[in-house]
Image (cartoon, rainbow, N blue to C red):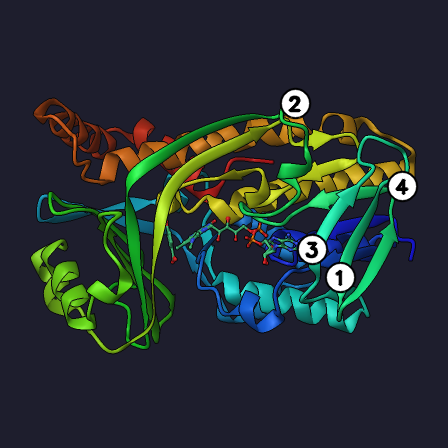
Amino acid sequence: MKVQVGIIGGGPSGLLLSQLLHLKGIDTIVLEKHSREHVLGRIRAGVLEHGFADLMREAECGARMDREGEIHTGLYIAHDGIRERIDLAKYSGGNSVMVYGQTELTRDLYEARDKAGGIVIHNAGDVQPHGIETDAPYLTWREDGVERRADCEFIIGADGFHGVSRKSIPRGVLREYERVYPFGWLGVLSRTRPVSPELIYARHDRGFALCSLRSQVLSRYYIQVPLSDRVEDWSDDAFWDELRRRLPQDVAEALITGPSIEKSIAPLRSFVAEPMRHGRLFLAGDAAHIVPPTGARGLNSAASDIYYLYHALVDHYHNSDDIGLETYSQRALARIWKAQRFSWWMTMLLHTFPDAIPYDRRLQRTELEYLFSSDMAKGSFAENYVGLPF
Ligand code: RFL
Ligand code: PHB
């Protein structure tokens, strides 16, 4: 089989790129290790930058998002028993975010690929990129016990943090930057009315908490937990009690609880691999970088890579212009590092660190006081949260 672009990974990054390229007449194959049900069973991101929402529309995948998603023009930060709002629209020159779950977005992308007859191979075993340093790269994988091969012009590694793509770049070439945080987030999805129509990020001495949502009947809540905790340690009742303790009283009293329909713990990590290109292999999304979820940047950073890669490949195929491909790593990383900075900053601002000294806690308070007393600080927060320009 011969295709122009071979994509490893059928998560949001791989599917979005495949769909965008298809609309420009560029053919792709997507190789996904898991089943579609498995990919759609993962509960992850919920907040999309406005630029990402535009990219979904450009991919002709925005109709349901525009119907069912919610545009949020503000959010709350709770601390010391109070809740303060940041007007994202006011401080970012009229921009907003779209609250629409990654699961739904991925489902829309799958449907679009199906409708267009796109090739997405599920349960692809032992996917391997070959010849990435040559002009004739190819992919091999196992399908129903049979060894398969696709020759391509470019290979895109969109196979997430644990994928095979990044590992196929020689050790001496890759530089990795990493910070592991000493806690995780325990998340619960419940079919209950959200406690607040807008997100509440809460700083509390017992640990961080977040009230988020998927719709007005589906809530998503998180609490910071030690890395040693297991999901089985947390009954639904224990989760709700702990969440209430970390919220201002009026919010805690308004909280509607119910049985969890999903419960999981995610460790927090910041990670960047440089460069994002080696020969004919281009990394995108979580394959190259991850952030702690505090700033809601993970999926959005993946989308920004896809934006650059999409334009670079279209320029290559339609205009014989390779500048986009040659500068991809540099341009993508410039934006990625800003998302890393914002996620790190929000994580440091809002979490309780086991080794924090009194000085650190006093600085956290001062940082919050500054944020809410300065229009400039609110402007900086808002422009980062709604998404920096591509
Ligand atoms: P994905 O989604 O991990 O998809 C990669 C796909 O590649 C497949 N794969 C392979 N396929 C073939 N061969 C192999 N060897 C393979 N190895 C892996 C995998 O099965 C998978 O289907 O990466 P992608 O597409 O780059 O997308 C990135 C996002 O999923 C991720 O950044 C976000 O979910 C992060 N994130 C959030 N991002 C936001 O922008 N806003 C948020 O509000 C937000 N909240 C979150 C989050 C992530 C979370 N967790 C659990 C990590 C909340 C949580 C709790
Ligand atoms: C979510 O709804 O899952 C979510 C929202 C905002 C974040 C992280 C996760 O910062």
Structural crowding at the residue carrying mark 4, measured as other residues with C-alpha within 10 Å and reported as few (<14), some (14–19) or many (≥20): some
Is the residue under label 4 in contact with that under label 2 (CB below 8 Å)?
no
Q: Type of residue at label 1?
A: Arg
- The answer to whether 257 appears left or right of 149 in the picture is left
Which SS class for mark 3?
Answer: strand
Give the residue type that dot 4 points to: Tyr
Ranked by sequence position, the earlier of labels 2 and 4 is: 2
What is the secondary structure assignment of the residue under circle 2?
A: loop
Asked if one can make out residue 58 in the rendered structure from this viewpoint, the answer is no
Pinpoint residue 369: horizontal percent, then vertical percent.
Answer: 17, 31
Residues under numbered marks 1 and 3 in contact, where contact means CB atoms less than 8 Å apart:
yes
Task: Give the mark nearer the N terminus: 1 vs 4.
Answer: 1
Q: CA distance from mark 2 to mark 1?
A: 28 Å
- Distance of label 2 from label 4 (alpha carbons): 27 Å
Return the residue at label 1.
142
Determine which of the numbered discs, if any, sits on residue 126 in the image: 3
Q: In the rendered view, would you say 256 is above or below 62?
A: below
Looking at the picture, tell me which residue is in the foreground, 37 or 210.
Answer: 37
Position of the N terminus by quadrant: bottom right
